[in-house]
Amino acid sequence: MNRILLTALTAIVAASLAVIASGCRGPKLATADAQMERGEYFDASASYRKIYNKLKRPADRPLRGEVAFKMAEADRRLGRAGRAAAAYRNALRYGYPDSIALLRMATMLHASGKYPEAIDAYSQYLASNPRDAEAQSGLSGARQAARMKAMPTRYIVKQQKLFNSRRADFSPVLDSEGRLYFTTTNEKVTGTSRSEVTGTKRCDIWVADKDEQGRWQRPLPAEGALNTEADEGVIAFSPDGRTMYLTRASKNPQADSPAMICTSTRSEASWSEARPIDLTADTVYSYGHPAIDPSGRYIYFVSDRPGSIGQTDIWRIELNSAWAVPENLGMAINTPGREMFPVMRTDSLMYFSSDGHPGMGGLDLFMARLQPSGVWSVRNMGVPLNSEADDFGMTFEPEREAGFFSTSRGDARGYDHIYSFELPDLKINISGYVTDLEEEPIAGATVKIVGDDGSNRRAVTRDDGSFSFPLDRGVRYAMLAGANGYLNARQEFESDTAAADADYAVDFMLASLTRPNVVENIFYDFDKATLRPESTEALDALVKTLQENPGINVEMGSHTDRVGSDAYNVRLSERRAKSVTDYLIGAGIEPAVVARLRQITTQEGDPPHQPPLSAVCRRNGARRSLYRHLVGRRPRRRRPDQPPHRIPRHLDRLLLLTA
């Protein structure tokens, strides 16, 4: 609500405008009009309301519509969106002839969060004014608002009651030592007079500090000669923190008093009397809301000076150049509406508030980044940082996406209050269990995870075999699990790039080194040594296991039926064994490792060296679990209707033995 330093930038009206004070309008209406001309919106609103309530005759309808419109204009400037929308509606009901009343009602409905009604009012106005840029932007914003509310950002905002009074408290700024300065109109400020613009006491600059435990203490007036009977506030600091730039607006009954930017210097804990800074030779137009970039090269400010695109624009000028001239930031930033409260986080990253860009209603917070091309890219900060009310004046903690801002949300009087904001770190975790093939937990197993971002972490499983790691988004990870007496196991995955919390789950099943472990599903066609395509999955998993577990022995059992002579079947088994060894060598396994492969040939009816193949295939415990461990899914089942001659009658098995 407190727009004394904001409104002073827009309230200067040419002195030649006449105050209507004759005829049926009467002296009281003339007084209200004069208050409005002087920017005394609080007093003007009260005066118009009294006049409006007395105009009850049918003949007074046109005048009542005009008074309702003027009352709405005063309330709009005070940030009383609900009152203003109702007054504009009354103006239209009583036949106010200017269609601008319909546009203003739309913007106030928008600022009240009544988006369907605002869309309807914008659409009605655009039907007769199709090229109006303000209405087009407003309609776009009202349509976007519902989507932004339905898809809030991850920011968390909280009202900071310790800093807030029963009046307006706004534009917080953290200094280099962590103190929080802000502008306030509480009842304990310097001076006794009240602002004709807002009806509150005039603005002062207060500061809050932390105690030794890091807890915020109650704010106090800034020490020194900084605060006066005038309005002071909306500040910024030089990069070294020794100079404060502030906005001052004073009341001069004899002449227009535009807002100006002043500076104050700090000596120990005390601030000097503020003195105007000579940005330009112009003394007619208003200048305020200073912001200094971290390099100290530019001062950014808000003004209604000639060359402005809208009601108030953001400009900048070099601080230490005798030949510098103000530079308008251009149409990417400035609109026909109001742009104000700039904050320079870096030399190329600015935060500001606007009611001209599409948004939630009222002033919305925007982030603008200066591209290498010299063009600004602008993005609405979204919900919950923005609301249907006015949201402005951000300040950031060092190296954190956290800080404070001000907003008039939730206050029917339109008073501003200080809120904190924080973007929590993303919580991305991976967790799981390490078990043996019987799914019994393995305590004390080591799980390592290595990311392509250079991260390298290690964990030991708990008694229940569980483990967990924090992750970063958009990183490709490799994981390796191992334990004494078990084969190692490896898995890979990539975390999502979405800006959202995520939990990943992965389990490891480790095969024991104290007993043979069967790798099944190595197939050949009938009477051939050529590996069938479906064998590659199991063999590729074996290659991976050999690479991760150097030193283990592999025994291959080649099983044939009794068709053909024994000598023929032995030669067939040898050729099949060579097919497997050739595959392993071709996949990168060292020949020395493959040379340790031991071949065993059996026929149907022979005493088995290991459990018969049929028995191995029937088991659904450790044998199939090992297959899942190596290959990642269960063995495929052949179709019952598959022709008998297509069923592979010769299947080999590999047993992984200890070294």
Image (tube, rainbow, N blue to C red):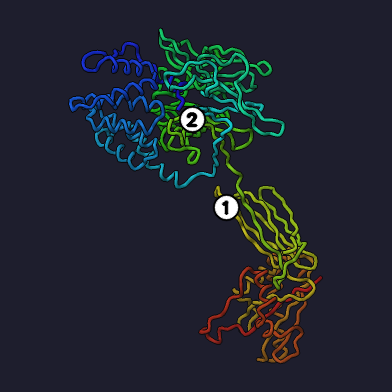
Mark 1: secondary structure: loop
Q: Which x, y percent locates residue 495?
A: 60, 53
Seen in the picture, residue 650 relative to 401 is either above or below; the reply is below
**Residue at point 50% right, 38% down?**
385
Numbered mark located on residue 234 in the image? none
Q: Is residue 332 visible?
A: no
Judge from the rendering whether residue 644 lies leftward or rightward of residue 1; answer left or right: right
Seen in the picture, residue 360 relative to 20 is either above or below; the reply is below
Quarter location, residue 587: bottom right
**Residue at point 18% right, 25% down?**
59
Seen in the picture, residue 284 relative to 371 is either above or below; the reply is above
What residue does disc 2 label? Answer: 416
Of badges 2 and 1, the one in the foreground is 2
Q: Which residue type carries mark 2?
A: Asp
Q: Nearer the viewer, residue 401 or 233?
A: 233
**Residue at point 67% right, 89% down?**
561
Q: Residues within 10 Å of mark 2 (few under 14, many from 20)?
A: many
Q: Which x, y percent locates residue 473?
A: 60, 49
Judge from the rendering whether residue 42 lies leftward or rightward of residue 489; answer left or right: left
Numbered mark located on residue 496 in the image? 1
Dot 2 or dot 1: first in sequence order is 2
Q: Residues within 10 Å of mark 1 (few under 14, many from 20)?
A: some
Separation of residues labelled 2 and 1 (CA atoms): 39 Å
Q: Is residue 280 visible?
A: yes
Q: Which residue type carries mark 1?
A: Asp
Q: Which x, y percent locates residue 111?
A: 39, 35
Quarter the N terminus occupies: top left
Q: How many marks?
A: 2
Q: Nearer the viewer, residue 20 or 233?
A: 20
